[in-house]
Image (cartoon, rainbow, N blue to C red):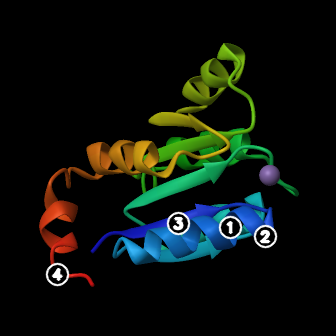
Amino acid sequence: MSRILLVEDNEMNRDMLSRRLMREGYEVIIAVDGQQGMSMAQSEAPDLILMDMSLPVIDGWEVTRFLKAADATKEIPVIALTAHAMSTDRDKAMEAGCDDYDTKPIEFSRLLEKMEALLGTSGERASAGGKTS
Ligand code: MN
């Protein structure tokens, strides 16, 4: 199953989202600021990154620009998560190299669809889900 790096400084958001992702069968690794997210993206080779944009130490835009400029990490899909639905935020995220974008509060099923599209696993979850109680 895919390994997801969740970069999120808000503990409540982080716990809720990581629990829901694990329930879907994802392996979830956690970073609590941009610096940690940057280094874990390099050391843990995640299949996809969920990146809060407003982060301490280094913000999500800068982390994404860095990862997309490096050969070792540029292929990892990044979904930006921001608190604002403003189109400027979306544009900024796409300019930084994010592959997709979603706004908080997270609508989980919609986020899963975006993740599956980038992971190329559409339909996989449905068959796996049949076995869960
Ligand atoms: Mn934040």
90 w.r.t. 107: above or below: above
* Residue lying at 53% horizontally and 34% vertically, measured from the top left: 101
Measured in 3D between alpha carbons, the distance from the residue under mark 1 to the one under mark 4, in whole angstroms, is 26 Å
Q: Earlier in the sequence, mark 3 or mark 2?
A: 3
Q: Does the closest atom of ligand 1 sit within 8 Å of the Cβ of label 3?
A: no
- Callout 2, which amino acid? Glu
User: At x 59% / y 71%, what residue is drawn?
Assistant: 40
CB atoms at circles 1 and 2 under 8 Å apart?
Answer: yes
Q: Amino acid at mark 4?
A: Lys
**Residue drawn where x is 74% and y is 29% of the image:** 84
Instruction: Tell whether 117 sits left or right of 81.
Output: left
> Which mark is first along the chain, 3 or 1?
3
Question: Is the residue under label 2 in contact with that under label 3 (CB below 8 Å)?
Answer: no
Mark 1 burial class by Cα count in 10 Å: few <14, some 14-19, many 20+: some
Q: Amino acid at mark 3?
A: Leu
Mark 3 → mark 2, Cα distance in angstroms: 15 Å
Query: Dot 4 corresponds to which residue?
Result: 131
Q: Choose the circle earlier in sequence order: 4 or 3.
A: 3
Badge 4 element: loop
Residue 3, percent from left and from top = 39, 71
Report which residue position mark 1 lands on.
14
Position of 86 with respect to 9 (left or right) is left
Instruction: Please say if 93 is above or below 3.
Output: above
Q: Which label number is shown at residue 11?
A: 2
Could you tell me how far apart the alpha carbons at marks 1 and 3 are, in whole angstroms?
11 Å
Note whether ligand 1 is within 8 Å of mark 1. no
Please name which of the two marks, 4 or 2, marks the residue nearer to the observer.
4
